[in-house]
């Protein structure tokens, strides 16, 4: 995604044993916690058994949008409508991963990967409505999982990476509370049918982002822009997180359930009390809203005062007793790291609830808080170098975020579910078609040195997934952004591992940042 989309997303216990997991991770191999030492030099060492992995998402790579009984998703509908995606691109074919998964899993193996984070396309499983699943959709994922296991890789299944079945949207989409039950049923079907092959599940990819983009500001499907819809969607998704936790556990005794949240550490703009309080609200809203709901059965305090909180809860449709439904003792905590935010207080600005419009915060122009309840202003700074997508590179943020979450939630087991950067480097003829992408290598060096330091200081991180295995369909940016460690030529679907992919393979083999 580009800078604007990333920015728009900023509103204001160890698991059971992993069946088939290679080299079970042992915390005994971690060095004893030591005082923090500054990063800067490379050579950071990761613990034995650390799970190096790569991530993809169904709509971004699969293609085959209408094969084997698959139903339409909101992303199909959105991309098929003129004017939504840069260049008129669609995910109809994407990387053709649906047919080429064996080749792609062979790349993972060749790159010494131990974990593959992928997502299941819900409309392949329930194409037209709730109830009985589409066997051909299930069979596809069974074949993929078999190939993943054969390669000695642990499958990490995300149940929802944004490709909502269109039939769900036709019934009101995420603002409709009934969605929680439909989602839990779907999750239970997957866990029952694939439970012999998958033990690691995350319900949602970036719940903040897809509710806000899709219902708050309408830059993603279904394209609605209404504060009330957004707030209702938030609560339904949090309920669905809890309900699916229970349906997965009921369907598969081997299942471990975690998350794949988007998080960006917040830094107060000034040292003032007001900016520090605003940063705390930002953190609660953007980083830990769903995590807190799961682990503690309540939303964290993201609101300016109790009356703002009450108004927000009314909009969300929170009912007495919902705390029990929200609660889900996640086995491990997963989150992405891309960049950071600088946060200031926006409570001085005069905006009443009913004046809320569709505008997003941005680093130019609008200095209002995102909404009348949280009243913070978060910007993506430009002090460090920017990636091709305009995201600031800030390696230190990885250390700060991981140690903050570790501290706040009692040292949970952590998986980094995504981390990566967009650069357009392509095949270089003079070097035989090799793809030198030194800036991506430098990006990973920086963040991984900081991650190693967090582990050194006691954080219980067991996995890291680079985004992404392949260049792919980058949402509204279409194919105009490349995050892959493997280049994809979309004319003939040829894959070429970039230099960063080779570098990452060596890291995975040695556990050492070179
Ligand atoms: C993350 C999304 C992923 C991809 C990367 C660049 O926020 O989860 O699908 O778009 O950004």
Image (spheres, grey):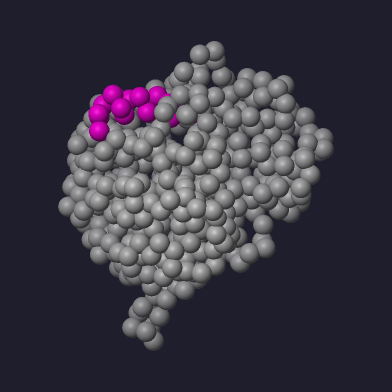
Give how far across and how far down residue 145 sits, in percent. 22, 46
Q: Name the residue: 25% across, 51% down.
A: 23
Residue lying farthest to the bottom in this orientation: 430
Give how far across and how far down residue 251 sits, in percent. 26, 26
Q: Nearer the viewer, residue 9 or 286?
A: 286
Magenta extent: 238-254
Q: Was residue 56 drawn as part of the magenta stretch in this picture?
A: no
The image quadrant of residue 306 is top right
The image quadrant of residue 360 is top right
Please tell me whether residue 10 is drawn above or below residue 430 in the rendered image.
above
Give how far across and how far down residue 201 sits, in percent. 34, 38
Q: Name the residue: 21% across, 53% down.
A: 152
Q: Is residue 215 left or right of residue 310?
A: left
Q: Name the residue: 68% across, 30% down.
A: 303
Q: Is residue 221 left or right of residue 303?
A: left
Q: Is residue 119 left or right of residue 135?
A: right
Task: Give the quarter of the figure containing the C terminus.
Answer: bottom left
């Amino acid at each position: 995604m580009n800078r604007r989309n990333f920015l728009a997303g900023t509103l204001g216990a160890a698991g059971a044993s992993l069946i088939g997991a290679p080299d079970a991770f042992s915390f005994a191999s971690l060095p004893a916690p030591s005082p923090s030492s500054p990063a800067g030099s490379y050579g950071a060492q990761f613990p034995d058994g650390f799970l190096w992995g790569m991530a993809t998402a169904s709509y971004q790579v699969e293609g085959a949008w209408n094969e084997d009984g698959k139903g339409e998703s909101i992303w199909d509908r959105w991309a098929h409508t003129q004017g939504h995606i840069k260049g008129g691109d669609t995910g109809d074919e994407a990387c053709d991963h649906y047919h080429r998964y064996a080749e792609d899993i062979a790349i993972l193996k060749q790159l010494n990967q131990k974990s593959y984070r992928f997502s299941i396309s819900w409309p392949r499983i329930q194409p037209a409505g709730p109830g009985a699943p589409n066997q051909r959709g299930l069979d596809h994922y069974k074949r993929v999982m078999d190939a993943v296991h054969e390669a000695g890789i642990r499958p990490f299944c995300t149940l929802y990476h944004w490709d909502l079945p269109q039939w769900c949207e036709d019934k009101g989409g995420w603002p409709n509370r009934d969605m929680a039950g439909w989602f839990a049923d779907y999750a239970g079907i997957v866990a029952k049918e694939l439970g012999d092959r998958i033990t690691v599940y995350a319900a949602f990819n970036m719940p903040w982002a897809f509710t806000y983009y899709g219902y708050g500001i309408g830059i993603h499907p279904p394209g609605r822009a209404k504060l009330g819809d957004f707030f209702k969607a938030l609560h339904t998704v949090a309920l669905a997180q809890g309900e699916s936790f229970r349906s997965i556990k009921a369907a598969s005794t081997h299942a471990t359930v975690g998350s794949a949240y988007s998080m960006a550490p917040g830094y107060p703009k000034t040292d003032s009390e007001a900016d520090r309080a605003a940063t705390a609200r930002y953190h609660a809203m953007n980083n830990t809203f769903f995590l807190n709901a799961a682990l503690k059965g309540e939303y964290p305090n993201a609101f300016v005062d109790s009356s703002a909180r009450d108004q927000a809860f009314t909009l969300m449709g929170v009912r007495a007793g919902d705390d029990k439904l929200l609660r889900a003792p996640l086995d491990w905590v997963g989150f992405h790291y891309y960049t950071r935010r600088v946060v200031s207080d926006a409570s001085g600005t005069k905006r009443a609830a009913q004046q809320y419009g569709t505008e997003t915060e941005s680093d130019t122009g609008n200095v209002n808080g995102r909404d009348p309840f949280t009243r913070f202003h978060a910007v993506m700074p430009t002090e460090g170098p920017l990636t091709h997508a305009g995201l600031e590179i800030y390696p230190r943020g990885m250390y700060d975020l991981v140690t903050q979450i570790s501290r706040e939630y009692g040292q949970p087991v952590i998986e980094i579910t995504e981390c990566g950067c967009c650069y357009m480097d392509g095949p270089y003829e003079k070097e035989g078609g090799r793809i030198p992408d030194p800036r991506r290598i430098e990006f990973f060096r920086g963040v991984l040195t900081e991650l190693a330091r967090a582990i050194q200081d006691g954080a219980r991180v067991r996995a890291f997934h680079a985004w992404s295995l392949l260049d792919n369909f980058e949402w509204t940016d279409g194919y105009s952004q490349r995050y892959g460690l493997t280049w994809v030529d979309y004319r003939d679907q040829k894959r070429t591992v970039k230099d960063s992919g080779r570098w990452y393979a060596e890291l995975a083999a040695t556990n050492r940042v070179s």
